[in-house]
Amino acid sequence: MVYGVLMILLIVVIILSVKIYLLKRSAKEISKEFADRLNTDTNTVIGISSGDKDMRELADSINKQLKILRREHLKFRQGDSELKNAVTNISHDLRTPLTAISGYLELLRREEKSPQAERYIGIIADRTELMKQLTNELFTYSVILSENVGDEKEEVFVNQVLEESITGYYAALTERGIVPRIDISEKRIIKTLNRSSLARIFSNLLNNAVKYSDGDLTIILSDSGVITFSNTAKGLSPIQTEKLFDRFYTVENARNSTGLGLSIAKTLVENMKGSISAEYDKDRLTITICF
């Protein structure tokens, strides 16, 4: 009798062990195929070898959710593509009338006019030039998003590109009363990058300092190739710092900004497999770039 009970228990244990093994195998299959479906653009459904009713229902449920997810992802991609095209077209269309306005303003400057009219024309000219700058930035951003900008790489002397960028912005910085403290490594920092993209990144970061700095700027290129731009920027909050790289985001005291400069820099850095981050501590904003 005891022997018979033990045999029954043994059989039950074996059956349960096999059942658990099959369930675990099915769970691993679902997990593996689910990860594969998320990483690949395919309509193939998740399939499992188990005939267990509950596990097959789980797989069917996941397949239904994946179908919904793919449909929403497709809508997002289409909408994003349409937005990029619209931004490109709008910014391109704005260039022509702005160029015409600039031309007529130049002709108007040559005409005799009162001092008051001269002042008004100067204001219109300044606003027109600002519109042209913002339109160009918007167009550049749309091009960077729609094309593989930064794919063409070469060995770049980072020290030289950084020095040239600082020189190009030195007048704009000093006009704001900013005398940058520069610490560029004497070691030759050579990276395989897109030179024009790197120059654009430095330009955007310097332009950001012109707009946001409270009067100082420190630029460091370390021996390891890490680049930091640091300046005092009182009034920023941790939430604002986290949003600095978001498209079209500007803080309240931004001057003549579309909120695209740092977003463009981030896109270009990531296109070249680098990383860019912002930290804010004791009223000081530090942007760090690593390649």
Image (cartoon, rainbow, N blue to C red):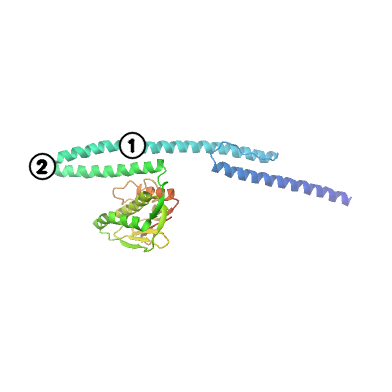
Left or right: residue 95 versus residue 116 is: right
Q: Position of residue 236 (x, y in %)?
A: 36, 56
In space, the residues marked 1 and 2 are separated at their CA atoms by: 36 Å
**Among numbered discs 1 and 2, the one appearing first in the sequence:** 1
Left or right: residue 83 versus residue 164 is: right
Q: Secondary structure at mark 2?
A: loop
Question: How many numbered callouts?
Answer: 2
Farthest front residue in view? 155
Q: Is residue 289 above or below residue 73?
A: below
Tell me the amino acid under the disc marked 1: Ile
Specify the quadrant of the image occupied by residue 175. bottom left
Mark 1 lies on residue? 90
Residue 278 can be seen in this image: no
- The front one of 85 and 216 is 85
Left or right: residue 39 versus residue 206 is: right
Tell me the amino acid under the disc marked 2: Ser
Asked if the residues shown at circle 1 and circle 2 are in contact, with their CB atoms under 8 angstroms apart, the answer is no
**Disc ID at residue 142:** none
Mark 2 lies on residue? 114
- The front one of 20 and 158 is 158
- The front one of 62 and 48 is 48
Farthest right residue in view? 1
Q: Position of residue 76 (x, y in %)?
A: 46, 38
**Which mark is in front, 1 or 2?**
1
Q: Report the residue at 41% width, 36% height from top.
A: 82
* Quarter containing the C terminus: bottom left
Q: Position of residue 281 (x, y in %)?
A: 39, 61
Left or right: residue 52 versus residue 2 is: left
